[in-house]
Image (tube, rainbow, N blue to C red):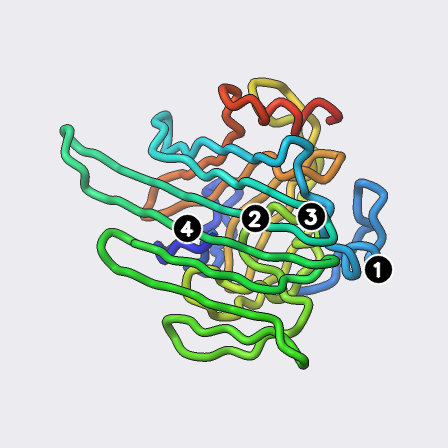
Amino acid sequence: MSMRTSLHRPSVPKTGRRPVLAGLGAAALGAALPFGLSRSATASVPMNGIPPAGLIPFDIRRGDSVIGAHTLRFSGDASRLTVDIAIDIEVKAAFITVYRYTHRNTETWADGRLQAIQTRTDDNGDTLSVSGRATADGFRVEGSQGTVAAPADILPTSYWNIGTVEATRLLDTQKGTIREVSIAPAGRETVTAAGRQVQATRYAVTGDLTLDVWYSDPGQWVKMYFQARGATIDYTLNPGEAGASTLVERA
């Protein structure tokens, strides 16, 4: 996912990070990865975030209000996987819509590598699209800012994949550009996910992107947090979706 809105690191703690334009994600991690994953494992088969029920349903909150949903649906398996992503945001003031954002993204994976991606974004009337496909020597992307030659093992800014925590470059799924990032563990925390309290590892993403993302011990994406246009944006797993509970049952 990739929003064009400028995002900033949450105010706690304040670090003066650079704004991020991506939809929503560089140094190697200084500590061993959790979840029993080695660096070579995540590099060769970066598919450790596939949910058991094929669904990751987030509510998107702005302060105390739910302003939208971010839903990922998975079909297939690690050998041939399709991920369909839908983001819908609507912000109202006095019952009038003042901001609307939609994003649609289809990713195709084979044996741990991104094979193709197609996205379309409407950011409050501004339309963007990305088309990418694996080639013999890498991954070719056509986006709003032209053609980009990405490495074959590029990961997109869709965050479901636990292999993201080792990335130093991510493909911005809104604009089709490459984002240079540093991702480092920021401690263990108890977070609310699908109505339950679960243990998760928090990762701080800095560089061209600025946000915090949490993964449970089985490697499932369970939370995200950033700021947009001066407001706190918080991703929480929706307990009303039938598949959400399977994401935290093993946590």
Select label 2 or label 3 by which is in front.
2
Is 130 or 38 nearer to us in this picture? 130
Select label 2 or label 1 by which is in front.
2
> Can you give x and y, in whole percent of width and height, for residue 78 in the image?
73, 50
Q: What is the C-alpha distance between the residues marked 1 and 3?
A: 13 Å
Q: Please report whichever mark, 2 or 3, sits nearer to the chain's N-terminal start.
A: 2
Q: What is the C-alpha distance between the residues marked 2 and 1?
A: 23 Å
The amino acid sitting under disc 2 is: Val
Residue picked out by circle 4: 104
Quarter of the image where one finds residue 218: top right
Disc 4 element: strand
Label disc, if present, on residue 83 of the rendered structure? 2
Q: Please report whichever mark, 4 or 3, sits nearer to the chain's N-terminal start.
A: 4
Residue picked out by circle 1: 40
Q: Residue at x 64, y 46 (%)?
A: 203
Task: Please say if 249 is above or below 101.
Answer: above
Q: Residue at x 21, y 34 (%)?
A: 92
> Can you give x and y, in whole percent of width and height, for residue 5 in the image?
35, 54
Total numbered circles: 4
